[in-house]
Image: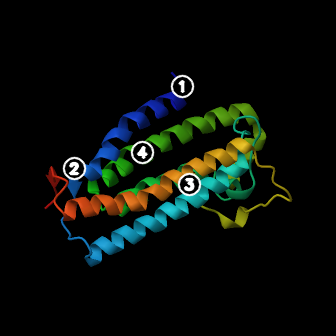
Amino acid sequence: MSIRKLRVRLLRLVFVPYVIAPFISRPPWPRGSAMDTVFEWAGYGLMLAGLFLRMWAIFFIGQLKSRELVTEGPYSLTRNPLYIGTFAIAIGAAFAFDNLIMLMIALLVIVPLHVVVAIEEEKRLESLFGIPYDVYRRRVPRFSFSFRSYERPETLCVSTSAIRRAAIDTFVVLLIPPLADLVELLYAHHLLPMLLEFP
């Protein structure tokens, strides 16, 4: 089984507890408190940043993944903008829901899993593209940003599948804030049982 297929299977397995977590646990701070507000708005900011980065990366990589070495746009800032966007969305959603279980799943499973996959993908990309990839790898960081290396193309051709994928990402991420508010209201009106409570 390839590392990519293993990643997809593990993410599907983790997805269930990650999605269920807001419905079974709440943080110790009250709704509307300063801590609640800080976490919620930090979450929204992270999700929007992650969404923007993912959309930007999707438009650049389109259907070129593994067929062409993409080194411009977000890929000139970091080698893994899609994964960094995913990290930001997963952590941001945990903050928006004020949910420590979601945060632990994001930090202990989702992030490390993508790091392992990225390292494995680098080996494959090096075998596919050879010296040009090695030069790119030395110039652009794996999971941080280097604004010195930013390159922008004169033109950008975006595939319709990339637009569709970005639209789906956007739709899913934009559903999170109203869903987080709904869960808070259900807890506030005691319509949702709290199965796990953090001290």
Q: What mark, if any, has residue 170 been given in the picture? A: 3
Amino acid type at mark 2: Ile
Quick one: label 2 or label 3, which is nearer the N terminus?
2
Q: What mark, if any, has residue 54 been given in the picture? A: none
Quick one: label 3 or label 4, which is nearer the N terminus?
4
The residue that mark 2 highlights is 24
Q: Residues within 10 Å of mark 2 (few under 14, many from 20)?
A: some
Instruction: Find the distance from the CA under tag 2 to the CA under tag 4.
Output: 20 Å
Q: Nearer the viewer, residue 44 or 112?
A: 44
Quick one: label 4 or label 1, which is nearer the N terminus?
1
**Tag in front: 2 or 4:** 2
Quick one: label 2 or label 1, which is nearer the N terminus?
1
Q: What mark, if any, has residue 2 been given in the picture? A: 1
Amino acid type at mark 1: Ser
Which of the image's four quarters has the C terminus?
bottom left
Instruction: Find the distance from the CA under tag 2 to the CA under tag 1.
Output: 34 Å
Amino acid type at mark 3: Thr
Number of marks present in the image shown = 4
Instruction: Find the distance from the CA under tag 4 to the CA under tag 1.
Output: 18 Å
> Looking at the picture, does residue 96 appear above or below residue 16?
below
Give the percent coordinates (x, y) of residue 73: 72, 57
The residue that mark 4 highlights is 110
Determine whether label 2 and label 1 are within 8 Å by CB.
no
**Tag in front: 3 or 4:** 3
Q: Looking at the image, which residue sits at the far top?
A: 1
Kindly identify the residue that appears in the image at 29 percent across and 71 percent down: 36
Give the percent coordinates (x, y) of residue 159: 75, 44
Amino acid type at mark 4: Ile
Q: Looking at the image, which residue sits at the far bottom?
A: 34
Kindly identify the residue that appears in the image at 20 percent across and 65 percent down: 188
